[in-house]
């Protein structure tokens, strides 16, 4: 019996901590005293079977959620408290529902399996939260751009990279980074291998030259070239803009083949 109580406490502690961590990710709030909150909530959970009235159990469960809320998160308005409380309650139901769903398929299982189910739910749910957060960040910093050069007009998605502080050492202009896919639209006769190995001598590249860089591709050289015009978000127009050919693979991280310079937004 003593062992069961200890295991039950450990499982409850783990689940309560997972609930708080998941709420922290969803709310984007710093978790404070998470271990203390989970510890006290676990003690309350162990004592709750002593209460037989269902309505009292529900009240105690809601009061426990409130306790975890006030101890673990800092809120300034009633709305923030309410949202935080609802998130903790929903996270609690998520973990409880997950255990009930597994139990409906497999029947009763040992207490340690509950912790495994809780950990699995936490990993999946937190991964979804992080993915959505990253997706929102990328969306907020994504812009539409139109490149114009001669008779060519090219539309692309661009990501505003605050870390892109590259300037052309010759023209002193800010540099927009592009992948080979974009570069090849301007210079179809330059193959990927020639561009990657910097064998571009003899090709007519508008104001094309190499610069030493310390950021993306540290310690190497980058081909930069000029195009006639860049239009950002349909209303910001820039003439004689410098583009830099990058092989850093940022398109896989940001979902865009263009990295804007902060000066051009």
Image (cartoon, rainbow, N blue to C red):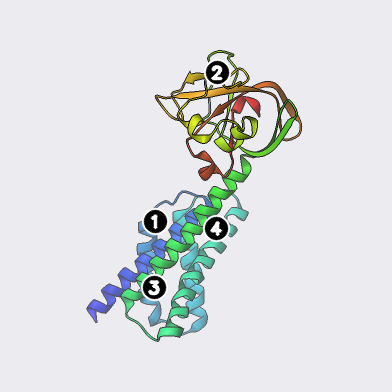
Which residue is identified by label 2?
168
Which residue position is annotated with label 1? 34
Q: Secondary structure at mark 1?
A: helix
Q: Nearer the viewer, mark 2 or mark 3?
A: 2
Tell me the residue that label 3 is attached to: 45
Residue placed at 35% from the left, 63% from the top?
A: 39
Q: Position of residue 80 (x, y in %)?
A: 59, 53
Q: Is residue 81 above or below residue 54?
A: above
Residue 214 location, quadrant: top left
Q: From the viewer's perspective, is residue 130 above or below residue 194?
A: below
- Dot 2 crowding, Cα within 10 Å, few <14, some 14–19, many 20+: some
User: Secondary structure beneath disc 3?
Assistant: helix
Which residue is nearer to you in this view: 243 or 5?
243
Lower sequence index among marks 4 and 3: 3
Give 157 or 109, whichever is nearer the viewer: 157
The extreme left residue here reads 2
Question: Local crowd at mark 1 within 10 Å, few (<14), some, or many (≥20)?
Answer: many
Q: Residue 99 placed where, x, y %?
A: 43, 76
Give the residue drawn at x 57%, y 49%: 135
Observer-nearest of 180 and 60: 180
Query: Which structural element holds mark 4?
Result: helix
Query: CA separation, marks 1 and 2?
Result: 49 Å
């Amino acid at each position: 019996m003593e062992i069961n109580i200890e295991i039950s406490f450990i499982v409850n502690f783990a689940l309560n901590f997972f609930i708080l961590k998941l709420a922290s990710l969803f709310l984007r709030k710093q978790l404070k005293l998470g271990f203390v909150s989970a510890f006290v909530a676990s003690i309350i959970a162990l004592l709750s079977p002593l209460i037989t009235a269902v309505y009292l159990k529900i009240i105690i469960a809601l009061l426990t959620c409130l306790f975890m809320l006030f101890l673990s998160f800092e809120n300034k308005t009633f709305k923030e408290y309410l949202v935080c409380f609802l998130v903790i309650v929903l996270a609690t139901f998520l973990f409880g529902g997950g255990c009930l769903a597994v139990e409906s398929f497999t029947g009763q299982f040992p207490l340690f399996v509950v912790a495994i189910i809780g950990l699995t739910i936490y990993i999946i749910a937190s991964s979804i939260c992080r993915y959505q957060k990253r997706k929102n960040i990328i969306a907020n910093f994504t812009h539409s751009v139109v490149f114009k050069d001669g008779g060519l007009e090219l539309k692309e998605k661009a990501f505003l990279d605050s870390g892109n502080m590259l300037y052309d050492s010759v023209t002193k202009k800010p540099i927009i980074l592009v992948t080979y896919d974009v570069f090849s639209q301007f210079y179809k006769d330059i193959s990927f291998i020639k561009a990657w190995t910097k064998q571009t001598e003899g090709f007519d590249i508008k104001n094309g030259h190499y610069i030493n860089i310390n950021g993306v591709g540290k310690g190497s050289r980058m081909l930069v070239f000029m195009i006639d015009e860049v239009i950002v978000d349909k209303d910001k127009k820039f003439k004689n803009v410098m583009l830099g050919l990058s092989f850093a693979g940022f398109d896989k991280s940001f979902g865009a083949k263009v990295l804007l310079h902060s000066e051009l937004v």
